[in-house]
Amino acid sequence: MEENNMVPVTILTGFLGSGKTTLLNRILKEDHGKRIAVIENEFGEVGVDSEIIEKSDEQIVEMNNGCICCTVRGDLIRILGTLKEKRDSGDLKFDRVVIETTGMADPGPVAQTFFTDEEIGNYYLLDSIITLVDAKHAPKQLDEFHEAQEQVGFADRILMSKTDLVSEGEIETLSKRLKRMNPRAPIKKVDFGNAPIDEVLDIRGFNLNAILALDPDFLTDTHHEHHDEVASFVYQTKKPFDGKKLEDFLSGMIQIHGPDLLRYKGVLWMKGNPRRVVFQGVHMMMGGDVGKPWAKNEAKQSVLVFIGKNLPKDIFIAGLEECLAK
């Protein structure tokens, strides 16, 4: 399908108690004119308020088997397939889908669903992964649970909740930690789910042609206060890449480190190509696209960001250096 006709999907994730359901309830209640199908994954958490469901026209689907993960990815494909059939037949009307994962879920397998199943991938457009972070409890959660770290690592946008319960200094410290873990996700404060709809839906965080925005301070901030399992690094160069060498190198690194690569994305200057090349991946699945042409007087450069668990930064950077065109 043409991208404009595809059904956008938002994955809403965040650790237990971060405010996912509060945000989802507000989205469902707001008069925004959007018809939303919700896939709700329950695991000992309070579901969508039944009163809200009764008052709304939304389609609520519950997955009560714990986590949306590898073992139940088939259920997610089946549910998305059923929603497609009902929408195509006119039995159900919705414009978009929101998947709320359980607080203990790794969002990676959910995102992979849109790469692994051709029918699903051609019908639904993965719009973004929104991660809620509890400002009060996140420092301890990030220390103790790798799921909390992976939720931050996969985020296209981070919404920080419960900021009224902590000091400005604590917010700043947590923000710096989150930026080191994932420099490509903007961080916004959200109070009791009160986030503007345009900061949650239709942000095209997963779009290959989206601009790769990095926090400028990230590249100069080398002081690390935490030894997080999930971390990130950025590679920049003003030299062009040799396309064949780069493809071979990245393919090899993904074969070795794919399970630990949460997200990776880049805007590339390739030798002999008048247009920028945009690529991204999730774990061992990588895709690329041709971006807009380089402007006549534009300074060409490549920017790549890698987010993952215990990645060998030195090996990646040395290999990328070897891929530059002679």
Image (spheres, helix red, strand yellow):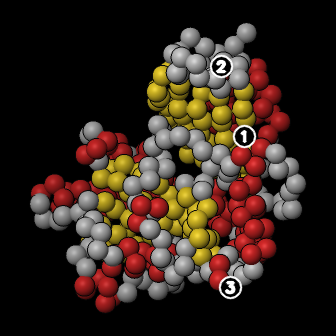
Quadrant, the N terminus: top left
Residue 141 visible within the image: no
Residue at point 65%, 78% (across, down): 163
Q: Is residue 150 above or below residue 141?
A: above
Per the image, label 3 sits on a secondary structure element best described as helix
From this viewpoint, which residue is outermost toward the left? 90
**Mark number, residue 234:** 1
Residue 187 visible within the image: yes
User: x, y (%) of residue 12?
Assistant: 48, 66
Task: State the residue position of label 2.
Answer: 241
Per the image, label 1 sits on a secondary structure element best described as strand
Q: CA distance from mark 1 to mark 2?
A: 16 Å
**Mark number, residue 157:** none
Residue at point 72%, 27% (across, down): 237
Please name the amino acid that badge 3 sits on.
Answer: Leu
Q: Earlier in the sequence, mark 3 or mark 1?
A: 3
Q: CA distance from mark 2 to mark 3?
A: 48 Å
Residue at point 51%, 81% (across, down): 192
Per the image, label 2 sits on a secondary structure element best described as loop
Q: Nearer the viewer, mark 2 or mark 3?
A: 3
Q: Earlier in the sequence, mark 1 or mark 2?
A: 1
Q: Earlier in the sequence, mark 2 or mark 3?
A: 3
Residue at point 76%, 20% (across, down): 322
Label 1 Cα crowd, 10 Å radius (few <14 / some 14-19 / many 20+):
some
User: x, y (%) of residue 154?
Assistant: 59, 55
Front in this rendered view, residue 50 or 159:
159
